[in-house]
Each structure stands twice: as C-alpha cells, then as structure tokens.
Image (cartoon, rainbow, N blue to C red):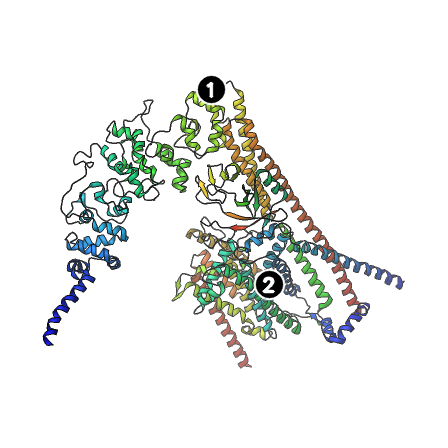
Amino acid sequence: MRIFSLALCPLVCIFATAVAAEENPLASSAKLTGLLAAAGPDGKPVLSPEQRTYFDGLNDHLKALLTKAVDADIITRADHLGSILALGLRPQKMEVFLQDNCVLCHTDPEVQKPETFFPLSQESTNSPAHHLNLRDFVDDAHFRRGLSCAGCHGGDPASDKLEHSFVKEWPGTGRDKDRGWVLSFCARCHSDPTFMNRFNPALPTDQLAKYKESPHGKLLLETKDPRAPHCVSCHGVHGIRSAKNPLSKVYPKRVHETCGACHANAETMAGFKLPDGSPLPTSQLAEYRTSVHGRALLERGDLGAPACNNCHGNHAAMPVGLSSVSQSCGLCHAGNASLFDGSKHKQAFEEHKWPQCAKCHGNHGISKTHDAMLSGGPRSLCTECHQQYAKDNPECTATADYFYASITHLDESWNRFGVIAEQLAMKGLDVDPIHDKLNELADTVKQARAHVHSFSKNSFDQVAAPGNQAMQSISTLVDDAKSEFRLRQLGLLTSIVLMGLVMIAIYLKLRRLERQEDRSHQ
Amino acid sequence: MAGNTSNQKSTRRGFFDFLLGASSVAWLGSLLYPVIRYLKPLDRAGAIGPTRLTKEELAKLEKERFVIVPVSGRRVLVLQNAAQEVLAVDAKCTHEGCTVQFLPAESAIWCACHNARFDLDGRVLSGPPPRPLPKYAAERQEDGGILIVAERRQSE
Amino acid sequence: MSDLDRGRGWRRWLDSRYQITPLIEFLRHKEVPKGPHSMFWYYLGGTTMFFFVVQILTGVLLLMYYQPGEATAYESIRYLTTKVPFGWLMRSIHCWSAHLMIISLVAHMFSTMMLKAYRPPRELTWVTGYILFALTLGFGFSGYLLPWNKLAFFATSVGTDLVKSVPLVGNWMLQVLRGGPDVTANTLYRFFGLHVVILPLAFVALIGVHLLFVQRQGMAPPLGAKVAPRGMKFFPSFALRDLLLWLFCFMVLLVLAVFLPYGPGIPGMDWELGEKADPLAPAFPGIKPEWYFLWEYQLLKEFPPHLFGLEGPQLCLLVVTVLLGIWAIIPWLDRQARRDQPSPGFSDFGWGAILFLTFLTLKAWDIGASGPATSPASLKAISWICAWWTIAAGVVIVGVRFWVHHHRWFFFTGAALLHVVLHGLLGLSYLVAGAIAAILAVGVVTACIFRDRRRQANAGGSR
C-alpha cells in the first residue's frame, strides 16, 4: 500500500503540472512575467496601469501569441512591450500585429536605426517626411485588412531571420531617382478587379489608366521629372486612410493642402508653362481660399462645396477643357448652365474660344455675384466685352439694363417690406402671411438672378412676373395690417370715450350724492 | 315754485341716472364684444392643431401636383405622387435654405440652387445637402380637404 | 329716501333669510379718515386689487387657449397673439397689468410704511400685506416662464439657480422648484400649477384676511394727523371715487396695451415672444430678470465668490434675508409709532431703502456702459453714472422732506447716499462702501438713542 502511494505521488504531480501547463501557458513564460514586472532606473514599473489593463484584457489566443514572441526573443525589452500594448489595438489588428515579425522587429528601438524605426507618437503626422509612424501604420487601410509589411515589401513575416527578399517591384537601388516604379507597385493590386473584389468591390480599379492620361502621369512616365506626383504623394504610404476619413490627405477639407503642396509652391512649379508660353500660375490656392467655394468648404465646413478634385478630377487630374467648363460648373449649377447653353452667348463664346462660366465668374477665385455686374456702372461685367464685340447691337445693353432694373427693384422691395414687417410686428400685428409672401418674393429674386443666364427678356420675365405678383400681395397685406392697426386704435378710442362718459356720469352722481349728504347734515 | 324746481331736479336727476346707466351698458358692451369674439374658436386650425389647406391651395395642388403651404411660420411642400397619395415635407432645402420644388416627371424633389435631389420621403439622393428634409404627416379628409399635422422627425 | 325704498323689496327678502341688515348698516357707516392729509394714498390698495382682478379675468381667458408643455406652450401663445381675435389684446393687457399691479403694490407698501399705518392695532395687516407682496412676486416669476421662449427660459434658469445657496435644503429646494436638476418641461408644468392654482388660492385667501382686517379696524389715519371728527363715507363717496380711479387705471392700461403691446422695450420689462426656448443652446449675454428682481440680481453680482468662509451667493442670501426680515417686523421694531409718537427714523429708513434699491436697479440696467458691460472700465462708468442719478434722486427726496415736510431725520438716507458716493464716485467696492455706510449709520443711530435715553433719564431724575 505504502509503495503504491509512493509511486503514485510523482505520477500525480507530473500529471498536475502537465495539466496546469496546458491550461495556463503563461505560467511557463518567465520571460513575459519578467518583462511585465520590469522596473525602470527610478524603481517605477516600466508598464503604465493602462498598458497593464490592456494586457489583462487580452484573450487567451493573443496572450499565447505574445508569449511566443517574447519566448522567441523577438520582444526582449519592457519598453518595447509597453509601446505595443499602448496601441490598444482591437483583437483582429493585434492578431496580425503579433504574428508579423517585420513589425515586431521594426518597433524595437534597440535594434533599429532611426531611418528604419517606427516610433509610437500620439498624433498622426502623415506627412511625406514621416513615413514611419506606428500609430499611422496601425490605422492604415491595408494593415486593417491584414495586409502588413510583407504584402508590399515581400519577405516572410513568420521568419525571424534577417533576410530581406523584396519583390521585383521594390527596386533595391535608384528608387529615389525615378519614382515610376511606385505606380506598378500599387497598381499590382489596385488595377486587378479580381483581387480587389475580395476586399472592397465598390472601389474602382481604373486609377492607373486615368493617371497615365493625365499631365501628372505624362510628367512622371514620359518626362521622368522627379517633381512629378505619384500615388504616395497624395495618399501617403504607411498611413493610408479612406477619403472619407477626416485624417486622410484626400479628405475633401484637406485636398486643397495636398494639391497646394506643389501647385502653390513657386519653387516647385518653376519652369512649367501654360499653352500660351506664360509661366504656370501658383495663385490658385490663395484665390480659392477667398472664393465662395473655398469659404463654404473650409470655413463653414460645407462638404457639398467643391475642392480641387471635384472640377479637375482625381487620378486623371487635368485642366478643365474649354468646352467642358459649363459641364463642370453645371454639375451643381445645373439651372444656370442649362440656361447658358441654350442662349446666344454659348455660340459667341465658342467662336471666340472663351471659357464659358469662367469668363465672367473666374475659375479659382469665384467671388459672390452682385447685381451691379449687370449695371452699366464701374462694376459692370457686360460693358467691357460688349464695347468690343456686339457693339452695334443696342438690344444687349437694353437687356442688361432691364435685368438690372428689375432685379434691384425686386430686391429693394424685399428689403423695404422686410423692414415694414418688423415694424408691424413690433406693433403686435400678425405678420406671418407677410413673411410667407416675402419668402416667395425672395425665391423669385433668386430665380430672376439665375435667369440672367438666358440673356433673354422673355425667359426672364416669366420668372420675374410672380415676383411682381408677390409684391402686390405684400402691399395688400401690409395695407390690411395697417388698417387692422387703425381699427385697433379706433376701438381703443371708442372704449376710452365710453369710459369717459361713464366717468363723467359717475362724477356727476357723486357730486349729487355728496350735496344731498351735506344738505341732510345741515 | 318749489314744486317746479323739484320737478326740474328730478328730471335732471333722471337724465343723469339714465346717462350713467346707458354709458355703463355701452361701455360693458364694448368690453364684452372682444371677449365674445375671442372665445369662439377659429375654423382653420388650432395652435398645434393641423393646418387645413385653403381652396386655392387645393386647386393648385390638383393643377401642378404640388403646392407650398405656410404651417406655423414654416413653409411645407405638399405633393401628390403617382399613386395619388399626399405627402408633405419641409420646403426649405437643408443646404443653403432655398425653396425646393417637386418634379412629377422624375418623381423627385429638386432644389434649383445647387442641383440637389431628394426622394419623396425627403432623403437626399444627390447633391450637397447634409440632412434630409423633415417630414410632415398629411392626411386626406372625407370632404376632400387635406390636413397637415405636426412635424414628425425623419427616422434615419 | 326713495333709493332705499326702491331697494326695500330685495333687502327684506335677503334680510329675512340671512340677516344682512347689520352688514348693510356697517357698510353705510364705514368711513375713511379725513383731515388735512392727502387721501390719495388710501386708494392704492384698491388699485392693486383692481389690477389683480384684471389679471384673473384676462388670465382665465388666456387659459382658454394656452397649452402648457414643451411642444405646445410657445406655439399656443404664438397662435393666440397672431390668429385669435383680440388674443393679442388679452395677452398684452395681462402682461401690462402684472407690471402695473406691482408698481401699485410697491407704492401701497411704501405709503403705508411712511404713514405708519402698521402701528397697533394693525400689525397683522402689515404682515399679511407683506406675504401678499411675496406671492405677487411669485406670480410674476412663475408666469414669466409660461411662454417658453428663450428669454423666459434663461431668466428662469438664472433665477432659480439662486435657491441652491440656501444652506442645508438648497439643493432639495432647487430640484423641487425645477422638477429636476435643470429647467425643463417639468419646470413648466410646476410653474403652471403654481401660477394658475396654488398662488391664486393662497392670494385670494390672504386678500380675504387682509381686507377683513381693514374692514374690522377701518383705514388708519396718518400718525399725528388732525383727523376730522367725521371721515369721508365709504359708500358712496370713497367707493365712487375709487371706481373713477379704477376706470382711469383701466384707460391707461388699454392705451399701453394697444400702443406698446410688447412692453416699453426696457430690459426686464419686455415680453416680445421672440424665439422658442432651446435648452441645449447657450445663454445669450445680457439676460436680465424682470425689473422688480433686478436689485437682487445686481446685489448677487457685487459679492465675490467666497467671503468670510461662505460662498458669495449664500452670504448675499443671508444679507437679503436679514433685510427682508427687518422689513417684516417693522410694526414691532417701531416703538415710537407704537406709542403714537412721530417716528422719523423709520420714515427715513424707508427712504433709505428706496435709494438703496434704486441704485442697484439702475446699475443692473448697465446705464452708462461703454462697450461690453462686463469690462472693468465699463463697470466703473456704470457705477459712476448710476451714482449721480441716485444722488440726484436723493437730493430731491431730502430737499422735499426738509423744506416741505420739515423732517430732520436723515441718517439712513444719508447712509444710503454715502454708500453710493463711496462706491460710485470714490471707487470703493460695493461691499466695503456698504459696510462703512452701514456701520456709520448704526453707530450714529445707536449713539442718538443712548443720548435720548440719557436725556429722558436726566429729565425724569431732575423733576
């Protein structure tokens, strides 16, 4: 009996240890425990409470991966471990991260040089000079889908040997001189519909084809100009985000900075010329900022307002062609474009090769229109051209004058009636019907201003007519309100007169009663 | 003599009493008139109660398939779709505040200012508006009239 | 007399059932004290009640259309003032009558105070009147919120916030008053209940008691006045005159209601409907409570956040409670009046109070502000200008009292003016200036009292 139990004990112990080791693999990793408890030179623990909490919250699978990495001596320092935990990655991303030896190695400050080390900084910098930001990297759209370093650079993420077997497209030398390789590097996947369909069927795959047709593409591929932009110039490289992400360099509110980085820089743009030989201007960004579109997008945050790419295109970015200015503006300003295209100006502009909308309104520095553009005064738009061309046609001036007179009349009436309505409201009258009609009048003014683009009195009159009707209605309503007020005054007067009579009668009665009283006491 | 003066006095007294009585009644009448007018409820709508379309508005709706109606200080677009149902949305575009219109041929609501398009429930189909148009409940009555009821928030 | 003969039929009918003859005899013999003094002050109580009756009548009419509730309050008032026939008139009268009632009430209170009507046996009449004043202010405050517009919402938020500073029960009181930690639709419901049921019931009950006292004891003659042996008969002389005055007040009310339907446009006396309240929007600057609360609102602003170990608002509340407490027990404090002897000290106290309130109210209106009203330069300018206006008023008051009424007691008025001079003209802080003026006043008054007592004792001893 005694011998039997003696023999049983070690068996039981071994069995228990094995079971314990199976259930709790951490118990066997002394290295990990050591790193977690490591203290810095000042005696305080290296890991912060938040990092410790994050570690405690990891599921078993991730903890096992982490243990494996520590035991394989890929993570050897407590601060390295801390920076990984500080990212606070979701389980899916953490799984990719922990199995990718490239990332694990390149985030270790001890073994990396500054130009190959991915530091963890709090904010996203995402500027060309700082491709190596760990926080940007884990936000990257590719990393999110599980496509890590090896996906682009090649190599085997599971290997812990220091081999760098890059794919053919990643040139070892000379990659800074001619960046044309970047295109095929990205297009390898992004122009392959079968491949892209696995990840996001909604993403287009024609970017490279479009780019090749654009001036940017020709500059890079034909002229081999080192200044030419390529995929990385606008999208970044390690922190690529969707265009709908406010941190993305191609988010609508940031597009102007991205384009302006080159196009607003006189040094970068030196040497480029317009078709007529004059130097390519760099004033577009400054003009855009002061324009109605720029103000709407950048100051008011109206995402409906156009940025550079809405008119010029993204990958096929090119100057807006002469014949397509109206089409481009007409995407939003459909009414005005339609009226213009049906008018006599269209033919005239085509003959003279003038850029339709832009001829009068400008292209980048489009400012708010004002009615004085129609007048014959100093701010007039029409006179300058019409003095040179179509000068023998008095109908033109007459039409412009007519437009100006009608619109200003309507506008001035709207202002005037608005003030009157305020005054009537202060008197306590009901001005809701007047406000409703004022809205109608305001609508008519807007339509009339749009119909200027028909350059035809008939068309204009059709929309201005309701405005005159509205003015009539308002006038009637104002008169009604004023007579209502007079009625109130009349009612007040009647009431006061009657009260006065009552007061007189009471006074007389009082006097009579008191006289009686005095007489009865005498 | 004394009898005459007392008679004169009593007629004068009677006159003054009559004056007091008549003016009091007249004055009270002038007080009661506004109160009585005030107490009778109006035909068209209560404070929050539904707004009923006028005859002119109904006629315009029949002719042009839509009409813009003032409701509690706001403007509401009332339209009739292909299935003869009556729908109502706020007439102020959520982009820059222009008044929208109904395009029966395209079964869409359109804002001429920046080419915005909304579906008949007010949801944005294209263009710059950031939010859908708030909906109103419109009900047809037995007598053919149409009531616009208080605003109902658009559920996303 | 033929009048009575005519009435004898219904009188006999009622009398045989309810014994009304003693009542009629009482009313027939009721008199108002007559003498060389002005009778005008006797009418003010009646005008206050007249305005209150107007409030009840217009209030009931407004109740026909008003709907309390977040989605309906503002809209129903809008509908009322724009679409309902004469709705604008009812609301306008209701708002104007509220302000006129308070003006009349304040005049009534100060006149009874100056004429010492509170002396025995009429102490409780003063106390019930005091409570009625508080109830009226409650009416004003609760009614102000009911349109649920931006102005009302923020004024109520700021106003109810003060309640927090009451020690121990402050937070509880705040939540009970607001129906929650913030002003919401719950507050609207509670204020509506207050305004339409609770306060009217309390007010009517107290007015009944107040009038009962006045009927039982008759109206008080001014102290020391040579009262004629027969007063003015209440029915018909005083009553008809009262009616004339009420009709005149009604005329004034109607004219104001038609020509200034949204008030005179002074901040704190402005009830334009404006925009609907939005609890999420930030308060706009320049929010002011109603004019009768402006003095307290300004006084709160004069206190620093912490002082003597208490929070500023708490200390302010303490000071105000003490002052109001003194005002409530004046009938017992005024020993001269209790002995039917002239009491110039307390009249002066009343005038001092008027100047004190005037200065604070003028300051609250930012009169004399240059640029933003909260900049230090602007605050100095406001204090300066308001000080001069108050001094002007003070000079007029002192002048009239000195030359016309031959008063010689000016310590409290002087203290109030000294306070204004120290703060507005010499730039001392409001509290420091007030402390100096108060200490001086109390010191001088105490010294006078001791001197008088010693004189009396000497005079008594030497006899």
- Across the whole image, how many numbered discs are drawn on residues? 2
Q: Residue A95: x, y in percent? A: 24, 52
Q: Residue B155: x, y in percent? A: 46, 50
Please name the residue shown 51% across and 70% down the image. C325
- Which of the numbered marks, if any, corresponds to residue A389? 1
* Figure quadrant of the N terminus of chain C: bottom right
- Tag 1: amino acid: Tyr
Q: Which residue is mark 2?
A: C105
Q: Which marked residue is nearer to the observer: mark 2 or mark 1?
A: 1
Q: Residue C244: x, y in percent? A: 70, 60
- Residue A67 lies, with reference to residue B78, above or below; the image says below
Please name the residue shown 25% across and 34% down the image. A183
Of residue B125 and residue C372, the one placed in the foreground of this image is: B125
Q: Quadrant of residue B62?
A: top right
Of residue A402 and residue C232, the one placed in the foreground of this image is: A402
- Tag 2: amino acid: Leu
Of all chains, the one bearing label 1 is: A
Of residue C253 and residue C415, the one placed in the foreground of this image is: C253
Residue C229 in view of the camera:
yes
For the residues marked 2 and 1, what is the alpha-carbon distance in whole angstroms?
81 Å
Check disc 1: other Cα within 10 Å, few if <14, some if 14-19, many if 20+.
few
For label 1, the SS is: loop
Of all chains, the one bearing label 2 is: C
Check disc 2: other Cα within 10 Å, few if <14, some if 14-19, many if 20+.
many
| Left or right of C366 on screen, residue C231 | right
Q: Quadrant of residue A50?
A: bottom left
* Figure quadrant of the C terminus of chain C: bottom right
Can marks 2 and 1 be said to lie on one chain? Answer: no
Of residue A80 and residue C418, the one placed in the foreground of this image is: A80
Residue C263 in view of the camera:
no
